[in-house]
Amino acid sequence: DTGVSQDPRHKITKRGQNVTFRCDPISEHNRLYWYRQTLGQGPEFLTYFQNEAQLEKSRLLSDRFSAERPKGSFSTLEIQRTEQGDSAMYLCASSLSPGGQGWDTEAFFGQGTRLTVV
Amino acid sequence: RKEVEQDPGPFNVPEGATVAFNCTYSNSASQSFFWYRQDCRKEPKLLMSVYSSGNEDGRFTAQLNRASQYISLLIRDSKLSDSATYLCVVNKGGSYIPTFGRGTSLIVHP
């Protein structure tokens, strides 16, 4: 399977614990995005990388959240001291985009990691 | 005002009906537009890109109106399998961040 893969698919954790999710994008894609989605809402942007550089972070991304993409390939999203409000689907997406300005291309999504904080 | 707004629905239509969704965006510098489809508890998948001249893919037609800052999706001859949430996606000008609307739920019934 050469699509975007995310691990784990499901995670149940106790409030206050730390969790880490992994995303493996499509191999030649230079852009990687993290989104969070709750029931009845569209995906909300959290952060994105171009290669290994984290170029933008949403205000939704509190200091408990950190993301890395150390070699410009896979990425991890860590949530420290989880809260019940962190329960959501965390989606990763990747795209191959040309340099400079211009039209962007479609983003392909992984199946997501469903986090439940109890 | 949200960057991308959609009527959440649900739109309940019989098989064979024609249904249209609109989506408005707030940033006039936006350059790229897409419609994604999301089935229940699945990831979003690209349905179609939206070009300035409009585009058609089988029963699906997408239109862009830059002056009024909205995009539309028309589905003709609805099938039961079209039941899903349709997400409007806009990339802001100067930003490569796909921004999603909350989605419009479509239910096609026999």
Image (cartoon, grey):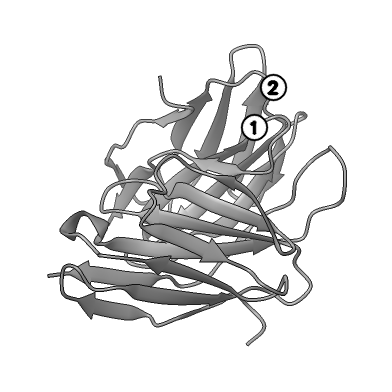
Residue holding disc 1: B92
In the image, residue B55 above or below residue B25: below
Chain to which mark 1 belongs: B
Label 2, secondary structure: give it. loop
Asked whether the residues under the numbered discs 2 and 1 touch, taking CB atoms below 8 Å apart as contact, a structural biologist would say yes
In the image, residue B100 above or below residue B52: below
Chain to which mark 2 belongs: B
Query: Residue placed at 68% from the left, 54% from the top?
Result: A106
Q: Give the percent coordinates (x, y) of residue B84.
A: 38, 55
Q: Residues within 10 Å of mark 2 (few under 14, many from 20)?
A: some
Q: Give the percent coordinates (x, y) of residue B76.
A: 51, 43
Query: Residue placed at 46% from the left, 63% from the top?
Result: A91
**Which badge, 2 or 1, is on the more N-terminal residue?**
2
Residue holding disc 2: B29
Q: Quadrant of residue A60?
A: top left
Residue B30 horizontal side relative to residue A104, left or right:
left
Label 1, secondary structure: give it. loop
| Separation (CA) of disc 2 from disc 1 | 6 Å
Q: Give the percent coordinates (x, y) of residue B8.
A: 31, 37
Residue A28 horizontal side relative to residue A15, left or right:
right
The amino acid pointed to by label 1 is Lys
Q: Are marks 2 and 1 on the same chain?
A: yes
Quadrant of the image containing the C terminus of chain B: bottom left
Query: Residue placed at 53% from the left, 20% from the top?
Result: B26
Depth check, front residue: B59 or A32: A32
The amino acid pointed to by label 2 is Ala
Quadrant of the image containing the N terminus of chain B: top left
